[in-house]
Image (cartoon, rainbow, N blue to C red):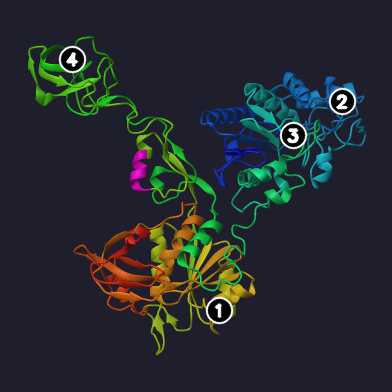
Amino acid sequence: MSAFDTIVMVDWSGGNDTGPTPRKDAIWAGVSRGGVSDAPVYLRNRSEAELWIATLIDAELAQGHRVMVGFDFPFGYPADFAGALTGSSDPFAVWDWFEARVEDAPKANNRFDLAGEINLGLGGGQGPFWANGLPNRDITGLPRTKSDYTNPFAEKRAAELLAKGSFTCWQLAGAGAVGSQVVMGLPVLSRLRARFAGRVAVWPFETPDAPVAFVEVWPSLTVGPAPDDMIKDAWQVQELARQVSVLTPAELAQVFDVQAPEEGWILGLGVEHLLKAPPPLRNDCFALPPGVHWTPVDDALERLRARLHPVLPAEEVGLGEALGRIAAADVRAQRANPPLPNTAVDGYGFAGGRAAGAHALPLAEGRAAAGDAPGSLPAGHAIRVLTGAALPAGVDTVVLQEDVTIVGDTLRFNGPVKQGANTRKAGEDVTAGAVTLAAGRRITAADIALLAATGTASVLVHKQLRVGVLSTGDEIVEAGQIAAEGQIFDANRPMLLGLLAQFGHRGVDLGHVGDDREALRTRLDAAQGEVDAILTSGGASAGDEDHVSALLSEAGALDLWRIAVKPGRPLALGMWQGAPVFGLPGNPVAAMVCTLIFARPALARLAGQDWPVPQGFDVPADFSKRKKPGRREYLRARMRDGRVQVFASEGSGRISGLSWAEGLVELPDAAADVQPGDLVRYIPYGSFGVT
C-alpha cells in the first residue's frame, strides 16, 4: 500500500447552518501532510463543506498528490437494509437513493420526513429509524422515542458492536445521534464519488489504491481529550489527520485489511495501537544502546535527529507576524513574478529584433508606465516604455532611450538589437504555483518579500516553542544581589534566555532553585503546560548534589549521555511531565557550547524546523595546538586578518572568552597537531543563528 500525500479528516453534521462564528457541533476539517497539520477549518454548512472538499481534492490532484478523505459517519447500514430499500445489497445504491431524495438547504432539510417514509415502507411505521427532532411537528411513521419502536434490522453494524461507545445509525436526534449525519452525508459522498469518477475508491467497499480514497472514521476511537483552548471537534480532526499521516505503508496495509462488503468499517478499528500517537517524545527517546559509555558528537547528533519530531500545532499568521517563525507547510506562489512581461529599462518597445544598421519606426501615441494596464501596439510601430511597465501586446523588445533619437514622430536607432532585449519574461523569477517557502524553514525578511511579491498574505506556521530555563545550585545568586563567600552570580540563565530569543523560541524564566530536590520537583511540576521543553544548568551529572539527573532517574526518564566533547561531556537528557529536559553543565562555557552544538538543533526540530547544520569554513590557524584523540574539542575563536585566533586560555571557567570570541574552532575527534597556517574548521556564531 503506497502512502498518501495528504490526509483530510471531516467531522460531519446533520443539522442546519451554524453561522459565521466557529463553534462546536458544526462541520470541521483537518488536513495533515507527513505529520504536520494545518489549522482546523470551520465549515458552517454542508454546501460549503462539499465545495471545500471538492476544491481541495482538485488542487491536490493537480499537484499529483494522493489524498485520503475521512468522514465521521457510517458509510453503510446494518446488513439487509440496502436490499430492502433499493433491491440491491450494493451500499452505493443506498448512497444514490438518498442523493435522489434528500432535500437540503442551509437552514432546512427533509431528513425526518424521509425517515418516516422509509419506516412506513419497511417497518410499518415503527422503525428502523427513530427520534423525530422537530419539536413542533409530529411525523407519521417516525417515533419520537423507542417506546413503540420495532426494528426489522440489526440495531448496530458489526463495527459498532466492537467500537465501545459508538452509537446506532438509526437514531436521528438526541445526544450522540449519528443517524442524521448518515442521511445528510451519503448524498454528498454520492456526488463527490460521481464528480471524481475513476479517481476515487471508497474503502472498504473498494481497494483504496486510487488517487483519492474515501474512508469512514470515528475520531473518538484513537484521539484523546482536546486541549483547553480548542473545540473538541476541531482538535479531533486535526489530531486524527496527523495520526493517519504518519502511518507507514506497511501500517496502512494492516489498517486497510478488512472485509466488510455491505456494512462498511471504521478506519483503525481493531488496530487502534497503530493510530494512537505516543507522547511528543517517549521516555526512552534519548536512550543509548547497552554498553555505550562515551558517545561521539556526530553519533549523538544523529540519534537526536532521528528520534525527535515536531511537537507544536500550526496557526495562520499574517506576513507582519511571520518573521522568525517556522513554516508548517509548503507555500506556493499565488501568481507569477513578474506577473506579466515587462521592461527592465526606460526606452522604446517594438516587436522583434533588428539587424546591424540604421532603423526607423513610427512612434505610437502614449506610453507604457509601471502600473498601467497593458495596451496594444500597432504592427510596425514603437512606443515609449518606462522601467517596470507591462509590455503592451505587440512588444517583445526594448531599446534603451540613450541609444535612440527622436525625429518628429519617428524613432531612429542603430542595430543590432536582439529580440527580447531589455525585457523580463512573465514568471522568469517565480512561476505561479511554484513553492516559494518550504515547510520547516525559519522565515526571513527576504522570504517575506518573496511571499508578498507572489500574492501570499498569510502563512501557516508552527506555534512558537516555549522553552523553560532553570538554574540550580546553592552557589548561585542573582546578579545584583549580595553574594556571600563561595557564591557566584548566575550567568547561565540570562545567557540561555538570550540564546533562545536569537534561536526564535520563547524563553520562559523558571528562576533558580538551590540544592533541594523537592523544591526542584515542585518547580518542574509547576512548569507543566507552560513550556514545551526545559533547559537546566547544573546538577546534570551523577554527584551527591546533582538533583536534576537524580529526579529524572527517579521518574524513569533519564539518560545520562557521556558525550566525547570538550567542554561539556555529561549531558542529561530526559522527560518531565511530557516535556523534554536538556540538563546542561553548570559551567557557563560548557553550557553555551552544549547549547549551540546539541540543544539548538534539537529544539529547532521540536519547533518544526528542518534540522539546522551550522556552516563552517576551513581557514588558516593563527595558533598552535596539540590534542589527544578521543574527544571533539571546541575552542573560543575569532577571525582577524584572514586567520583564526583562539582565546588564550582553554579553562572552562574563563567566561570572558565567550564574549571575546565570535565563533568556535572545531577540532576533530582524532589526534591533532595544529601549527600556524594549518587549515582548521571555524564556525562563526552567526552559523548558529546567534551574534
For image coordinates 61% across by 74% down, the residue present is 553
Please name whichever residue, 486 or 131, is drawn nearer the observer in this view of the structure.
Answer: 486
Tell me which segment is drawn in magenta. Answer: 444-450
Residue at mark 2 to residue at mark 1: CA–CA distance = 70 Å
For image coordinates 55% across by 54% down, the residue present is 311
Name which of mark 3 and mark 1 comes first in the sequence.
3
* Residue 450 place in picture, x, y as percent: 35, 39
CB under 8 Å between discs 3 and 1:
no
Is residue 491 visible from the viewing direction of this image? no
Q: Residue 204: which disc?
A: 3
Residue at mark 1 to residue at mark 4: CA–CA distance = 82 Å
As helix, strand or loop, the secondary structure at mark 2 comes to helix
Under mark 4, the amino acid is: Ala
As helix, strand or loop, the secondary structure at mark 3 comes to loop
Name which of mark 4 and mark 3 comes first in the sequence.
3
Residue at mark 4 to residue at mark 3: CA–CA distance = 66 Å
Which residue position holds label 2? 119
Q: Check disc 3: other Cα within 10 Å, few if <14, some if 14-19, many if 20+.
A: many
Q: Residue 382: which disc?
A: 4
Name which of mark 1 and mark 4 comes first in the sequence.
4
Can you tell which of label 4 and label 3 is closer to the viewer? 3
Q: What secondary structure do most residues of the magenta stretch adopt? A: helix
Report the label total.
4
